[in-house]
């Protein structure tokens, strides 16, 4: 059995609860145990580094230190959390003086950062640690006929970590294909959705969402699949505002990849948090059933 | 004789945590501007902003919305042929402008960021309703109603928390922060 420390992040507590629920359901089926960090704090999202770098690193280090206490690598399902944790670990490992300074602060909470726990995104867990082959073995309800747009977004891939393919990756499509679904050719799959701008620069963000939705529709996708709560909320919950702003008529569901994998595993939709979308997935789901 | 660093050097100094090349190595190829998904909404494209920084046009740079409109997508960073971490430079400019209290009027970003930080320092967790007042009043009636409608729909689906979350060891957490930034009486 694979075991990891798990940092859900603030969004998964409520706004993206369905992501958390479907993560728990699917990993259980795959024989993966996720142990939530005992007392995690906000990672600072894309906002904290705007104001103070040192404190931003400290906040992330506190979570990393808790994962190290478990002696396990840590999984983050949110791309912003993942990016912050991945690069904080890397940076502190390279700068021992900075790590010392932060460890002096962490003493107040009886924690210590040593840089031992590796950081992985939940999608990387599925794509690399488990792999499409293992996933397909658990599929009981293949999602044949479901055209999906695999949306990577940004911070899973960027900034570059090793020598990975940051211009045309395929691991997300491979995970979705292992459920029997058909990944469509989605040209803007790595184009930013503007999630971090939706509050502060609304019109710019809505224009970015508009582009992505149009490209997904043009690619004949029946739904968009994401691996990040910010992307999901931005693409789904702001669809109505895009429609009003640009005089369009989008109604394309946006689900988490764990919900799709869960459906293919035969887990009942409710346990995957399906039904809490603002753009209902039901029409697609019944279309899917009628194909069979 | 004292010699003050010019603006380009100042901004480069703020990039001590980034791995990329200094801004002065920019070759003005425009890959960043061509890549940037927000460029059409910016006062100056990233390429132009870097040229302005290198030319020492401090006031013009700080008066622009460019770095506050950066979405942190890091597309420019991975494509820059000179290996400049451009997105990180945008962060550095945000910090610089918050520190100086000098930014373009009407932007929501600076207040939003500061409120976000205060919220985390207080509770250790992010909670959306606390952030709403930083932007909602700058919206016109139509946008206000759209946003309220969105929030209501999400609440009905159980996707907005009624009460803010708080970490368990909040006292330790605050003392930890106090060792990084002295918080006066609070630490």
Image: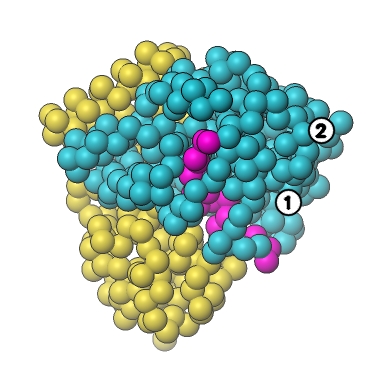
Nearer the observer: mark 2 or 1; the answer is 2
Q: Chain of mark 1?
A: A
Q: Is residue A8 visible?
A: no
Chain A, hue in figure: cyan
Give coordinates of residue A271: x percent, y percent: 60, 16
Mark 2 touches mark 1? (CB < 8 Å): no
Viewer-closest of A48 and B183: A48
Magenta-drawn stretch, dominant element (helix, strand or loop): loop
Magenta span:
A145-163
Relative horizontal placement of residue A132, taking residue B86 as reference (left or right):
right
Residue B157 in percent (x, y) is at: 41, 16
Q: Identify the residue under disc 2.
A: A3
Neighbourhood count class around disc 1 (C-alpha, 10 Å): few under 14, some 14–19, many 20 upward: some
The residue where tag 1 is placed is: A100
Residue at 59%, 58% (x, y): give it.
A169
B159 and B65: which is toward the camera: B159
């Amino acid at each position: 059995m694979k075991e990891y420390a798990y940092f859900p992040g603030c969004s998964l507590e409520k706004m993206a609860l369905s992501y958390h629920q479907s993560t728990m359901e699917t990993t259980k089926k795959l024989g993966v145990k996720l142990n939530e960090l005992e007392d995690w704090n906000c990672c600072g999202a894309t906002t904290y580094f705007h104001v103070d770098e040192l404190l931003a690193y400290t906040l992330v280090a506190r979570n990393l230190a808790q994962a190290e206490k478990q002696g396990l690598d840590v999984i983050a399902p949110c791309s912003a959390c993942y990016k912050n944790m991945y690069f904080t670990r890397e940076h502190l490992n390279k700068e021992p003086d900075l790590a010392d300074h932060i460890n002096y602060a962490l003493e107040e909470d009886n924690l210590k950062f040593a840089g031992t726990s590796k950081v992985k995104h939940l999608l990387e867990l599925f794509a690399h640690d488990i792999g499409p082959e293992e996933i397909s073995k658990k599929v009981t309800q293949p999602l044949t006929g479901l055209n999906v747009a695999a949306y990577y977004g940004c911070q899973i891939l960027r900034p570059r970590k090793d020598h990975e393919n940051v211009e045309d990756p395929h691991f997300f499509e491979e995970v979705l294909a292992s459920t029997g679904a058909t990944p469509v050719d989605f040209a803007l799959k790595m184009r930013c959705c503007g999630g971090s701008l939706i509050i502060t620069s609304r019109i710019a963000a809505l224009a970015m969402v508009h582009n992505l939705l149009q490209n997904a529709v043009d690619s004949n996708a029946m739904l968009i699949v994401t691996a990040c709560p910010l992307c999901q909320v931005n693409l789904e919950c702001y669809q109505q505002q895009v429609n009003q702003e640009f005089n369009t008529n989008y109604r394309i569901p946006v689900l988490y990849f764990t919900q799709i994998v869960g459906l293919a595993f035969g887990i009942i939709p409710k346990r995957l948090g399906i039904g809490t979308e603002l753009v209902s997935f039901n029409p697609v789901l019944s279309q899917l059933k009628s194909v069979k | 004789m004292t010699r003050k660093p010019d603006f380009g050097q100042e901004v480069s100094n703020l990039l001590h945590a980034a791995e990329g090349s200094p801004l002065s190595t920019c070759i003005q190829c425009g890959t960043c501007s061509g890549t940037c998904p927000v460029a059409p909404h910016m006062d100056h494209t990233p390429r132009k902003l870097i040229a302005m920084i290198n030319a020492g046009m401090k006031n013009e740079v700080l008066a622009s919305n460019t770095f506050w409109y950066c979405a942190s997508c890091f597309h420019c960073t991975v494509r820059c042929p000179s290996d400049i971490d451009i997105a990180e430079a945008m962060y550095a400019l945000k910090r610089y402008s918050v520190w100086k209290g000098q930014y373009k009027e009407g932007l929501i970003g600076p207040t939003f960021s500061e409120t976000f930080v205060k919220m985390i320092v207080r509770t250790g967790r992010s909670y959306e309703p606390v952030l709403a007042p930083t932007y909602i009043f700058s919206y016109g009636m139509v946008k206000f109603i759209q946003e309220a409608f969105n929030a209501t729909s999400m609440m009905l689906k159980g996707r907005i928390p009624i009460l803010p979350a708080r970490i368990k060891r909040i006292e330790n957490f605050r003392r930890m922060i106090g060792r990084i930034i002295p918080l006066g009486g609070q630490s």
